Image: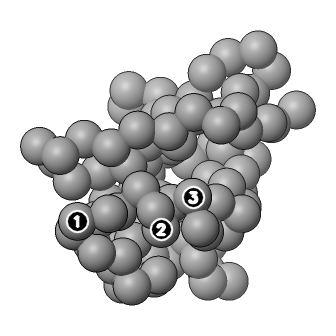
Amino acid sequence: MISFPRLECWNPTTNVATVAADVDKNRVLCRISLKILRDQFGASEKKPMQFVVQHRTEIQDAARKLIENSVFEKDGSVLIRACDFTDSKPGQT
């Protein structure tokens, strides 16, 4: 079972938002860059997390597909790319 607690944060050094997912009692960090937030949702550099909150459902759906297809990075996180918001195969660019 995959659930998404309301845990998210912004890393201003890497310009990446992280959204937490709980997968069978394990925490998985789901990352999305400012570039993807900007390209997909028109995010601004000043308030990127506003767009994460506003588009939470789409981001969680993309993360869920990656988790379900076991598309994990070496550190166990998932990296949401632009193609993950389309009908293409998850995790492929």
Q: Residue 28 or 73: which is nearer the viewer?
A: 28
Q: Are marks 3 and 2 in contact (CB under 8 Å)?
A: yes
Say which quarter of the image contains residue 48: bottom left
- Label 1 SS: loop
Which residue is at the far right? 1
The amino acid beneath tag 3 is: Val
Q: Residue at x 38, y 26 (%)?
A: 75
Q: Is residue 16 above or below residue 73?
A: below
Q: Residues within 10 Å of mark 1 (few under 14, many from 20)?
A: few
Say which quarter of the image contains residue 1: top right
Find residue 19 and report its horizontal and vertical position in percent: 53, 42
Residue 93 is at least partly visible in this image: no
Q: Are marks 1 and 3 in contact (CB under 8 Å)?
A: no
Find residue 12 and report its horizontal and vertical position in percent: 17, 46
Q: Residue at x 37, y 31 (%)?
A: 74
Q: Is residue 79 above or below residue 59?
A: above
The amino acid beneath tag 1 is: Lys
Q: Which residue is mark 2?
A: 51
Find residue 90 and report its horizontal and vertical position in percent: 59, 65
Specify the label residue 46 is tagged with: 1
Q: Is residue 64 left or right of residue 32?
A: right
- Label 3 SS: helix
Alpha carbon distance from label 3 to label 2: 5 Å
Q: Which residue is mark 3?
A: 53
Q: Residue 71 or 36: which is nearer the viewer?
A: 36
Q: Residues within 10 Å of mark 3 (few under 14, many from 20)?
A: few
Residue 64 is at least partly visible in this image: yes
Q: Residue 69 or 54: which is nearer the viewer?
A: 54
- Label 2 SS: helix
Which sits earlier in the primary sequence, circle 1 or circle 3?
A: 1
Q: Is residue 90 above or below residue 22?
A: below
